[in-house]
Amino acid sequence: MDWQRYTLLGGIAAVILALIFQWNEFKEQRAPAIDRETVVRSDVPETMAPSASDNTAGDVPTLQGETTSREEATEDRQLIAVETDVFSLLIDPRGGDIVKVALRNYYEELNTPDRPFILLNQTRGHTYIAQSGLIGRNGTDSAEGRPLFSAPEREYALKAGTDTLVVDLTLRQQDANITKRFTFKRGDYLVEVKYLVDNTSAQPWRAAMFGQIKRDSAEPPVDVGIGMSPFLGAALHTSEENYFKQDFEEIAEKPTRETITGGWVSMVQHYFISAWVPPQDVRNTFELRQLSSGLFRMGFTAPQVEVPAGSQGELSASFYAGPKDVFRLEEISPYLDLTVDYGWLWWLAKPMFWVLNFIHDNIVANWGWAIVLLTVFIKALLYPLSAAGLKSMARMRKFAPQMKKLQEQYKDNRQKLAEETMKLYRREKINPMGGCLPILLQMPVFIGLYWMLMETVELRHAPWIMWIHDLSAKDPYFILPVIMGLTMWLMQKLQPQPTDPTQARIMQLMPVMMTFFFLWFPAGLVLYWIANNVLSIAQTWYINKQVEAASS
């Protein structure tokens, strides 16, 4: 009996839902704790024999034909703390490396301002740091060691009423006084790194600046839906590709080396990025490589700079560590904004983000309602295509009884059934592909919008209404996925049903299957699908009424 079947299906659904709740609770309880404690390491370089042609395993790069020896100091040192309105940052005096970056305006979890999101860190089990130095004849860094800088203070903070914070580290060479200067600006995630060289010798001082990101291949904690895998790896601008990316496995198999004018090199993950941007008016050499320790190096080497005897000079680069802010990344360097990876449909997704951002900034000031209004805008833009497809489906729905009658009449003669079906199509001017083609033409727009919402950092921890406090996370009570399934089921009821019983059963299961998958999708994506379905229902109902009125 039907009631028994429906009772069984309801019981199965209840068990599945209970298992989902239990699994989420289990996953939260067993989730590994994030190690937040930054450690100071001796930073002994990789064991290597510097070569005149290449440096494949060293901790720092070397210039062709040049090596530098220095003694490694063993004294203890204390990390230098820097606080701005956007950063909590630690600098290691050994090399002047940035060994921790916590983003104060982005939290590790929702409503945890005491735990800012840690982008870079050097812990006992994880390495993700930004290094920079000088190499060459008079360089401070080599395969044998890194310099130990000194600083007048151990804590620096951006003061109220000031927009710039300067942190100077100093080093005395035999032939020069060197200051490594970090400049932080209020509200900005871009750090200017400069080497100020005072050549006190009677000979020209010569060295090249390098900057690199060293990282292991550990996956950051990311809560995304089933089948959604944001890119994790390195990216750079090359002579052939504006956005060339390699994941860690690809870097290990095939290292990359490129020399171009300007350029940048970055470490990309979901929502966030770190990047070195060297001077844009010179030819820089970029490298992606795995070191013998298993860590990965993503860095650049700029051309050598010569400082004449008795004069001053500088070498500089910029380091960005923060959110994938499309507009800021566009300003920093050409094509750096492509690290906001919308996939191959970026040419559609990027304009849609501009519209979404405009709606948020100028109309609603709520990212959830901005998604709804963007969906309305796109549906209105594509209405001519939608209307053509819906009219074709409405005519198909009208003649569904005749189609079923033909199937029953010629159920044992498939050739005759096909002939009579085509006669019906020609007589009633029905195009069976008329409903499919417009929908297929709209698919790139929907896919582009899907990836745009996936990559938009502005949705992270952004509330909508009531129980939806984070549009980038799944609905904690699974209400939106259920609503999405119901709207999908209602939309199916307004469309012509397949005459084949097997196809009909599969179509009936689709809302259930889609609801199941959408349980883990970010709420912002589910909201988009609900808005799209509701608008499609309204369009379908309106078109059906038009077709019925025209035929009566």
Image: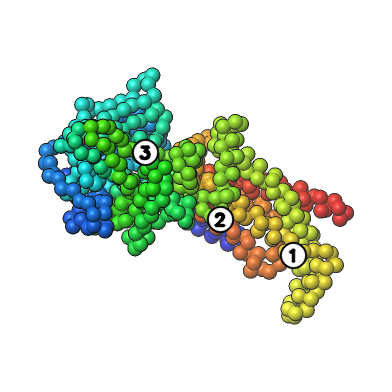
Quadrant of the image occupied by residue 118: top left
Q: Quadrant of the C terminus?
A: bottom right
Q: Quadrant of the N terminus?
A: bottom right
**Mark 1 or 3: the one toward you:** 3
Residue 550 appears at what percent x and percent y?
A: 86, 53
Quadrant of the image occupied by residue 80: top left
Whether residue 22 is visible: no
**Spatial separation of the CA atoms under disc 3 and disc 2:** 45 Å
Label 1 Cα neighbours within 10 Å, binned few <14 / some 14-19 / many ≥20: some
Left or right? Give the position of 336 relative to 508: left
Name the foreground residue: 492 vs 124: 124
| Label 2: element kind | helix
First in sequence, mark 1 or 3: give its number: 3
Query: In the rendered structure, which amino acid carries the disc numbered 3?
Result: Ser
Q: Residue at x 31, y 38 (%)?
A: 315
**Spatial separation of the CA atoms under disc 1 and disc 3:** 58 Å
